[in-house]
Image: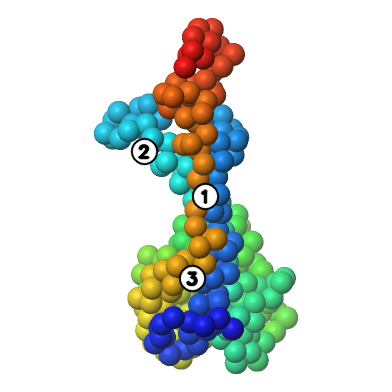
Amino acid sequence: MPTVPHNYNLGFISNEDIYEHVKKTVEAYRREITLDQFNENIIDPIKLTFDAKVYGKTIQQAVEDECFRQIDKSNTNRIGYFHQNLFRYAGNGWVVPSAGFDVENDELHIYVEMKNKHNTMNSASSQKTYMKMQGKLLDDDEATCYLVEIISKRSRDDVWKVSLDGKPREHKKIRRMSIDKFYALVFGVEDAFFRLCAALPRIIEDVVNDNPALALKNTVYEELTKEHADILASLYILAFKTYEGFDKLNNK
């Protein structure tokens, strides 16, 4: 176990376990972007020009923003990993299986699907998830199934109401729950999720400071300046190098 630099005072998970879990999440983050990766789908220099001029940025700032946008797309699933796999440390029968539901507790007959946001699922996805839960109730008449939302419209623990084949459906043991209520259910601490959110900035900071290799490596700007001293010209060359007239930009 790592030597943890601070006491996070969470009360429901040890300092060592939460540090290690955050470290694994950070390690899974995309932390590098090169010019080849940046331009994999051919960057639109005209949009970057508009972005820079309309929002009062330099071209370098617009390029950096686009880098972070691309990196961020890759990291969305990593946050899902963080939320789901934290329950590996809960004990008391809670598991994160490799197949089936996202989180399960066979001893308590609780089965959970987790979604990052309340509007993540379309109608077809909602129906599929609901029918999966119906199937679980048929297999286990003691089961309770939860759709747990990280970003919910409100704190909630209520019956999940859906439409199947144009008909409204609900069952008292198929429920919709916000993540704060789920933490309270799992850990027995009403404000457990709040405690985690309050401590998280310090934990992430500790992990990053303790592991310099986890720092972001962005070589896009440096590589662009090697293509052309003028960054915007470099972007136009990348996108339009075979177009008429753009060969004039090759004169650095």
Disc 1 residue crowd, few under 14, some 14–19, many 20+, Cα 10 Å:
few
Q: Whole-Å distance between the Cαs marked 2 and 1?
A: 16 Å
Taking depth in this image into account, of 8 and 89 the one nearest to the observer is: 8
> Image check: 139 left or right of 215?
right
| Residue 125 visible, this orientation | yes
Residue at 49% across, 9% down: 248
- Image quarter of the N terminus: bottom right
Residue 120 locus on image (x, y percent): 51, 57
| Residue 145 visible, this orientation | no
Question: Colour scheme used in the picture?
Answer: rainbow
Mark 2 residue type: Gln
Looking at the image, residue 249 lies above or below residue 172: above
Taking depth in this image into account, of 125 and 112 the one nearest to the observer is: 112
Q: Which mark is residue 210?
A: 3
Residue at 60% across, 92% down: 92
Question: What residue is shown with label 1?
Answer: 217
Disc 3 residue crowd, few under 14, some 14–19, many 20+, Cα 10 Å:
some
Question: What residue is shown with label 2?
Answer: 61
Q: Earlier in the sequence, mark 2 or mark 1?
A: 2
Q: Which of marks 3 and 1 is nearer the N terminus?
A: 3
Q: What element carries label 3?
A: helix
Residue at 36% across, 38% down: 61
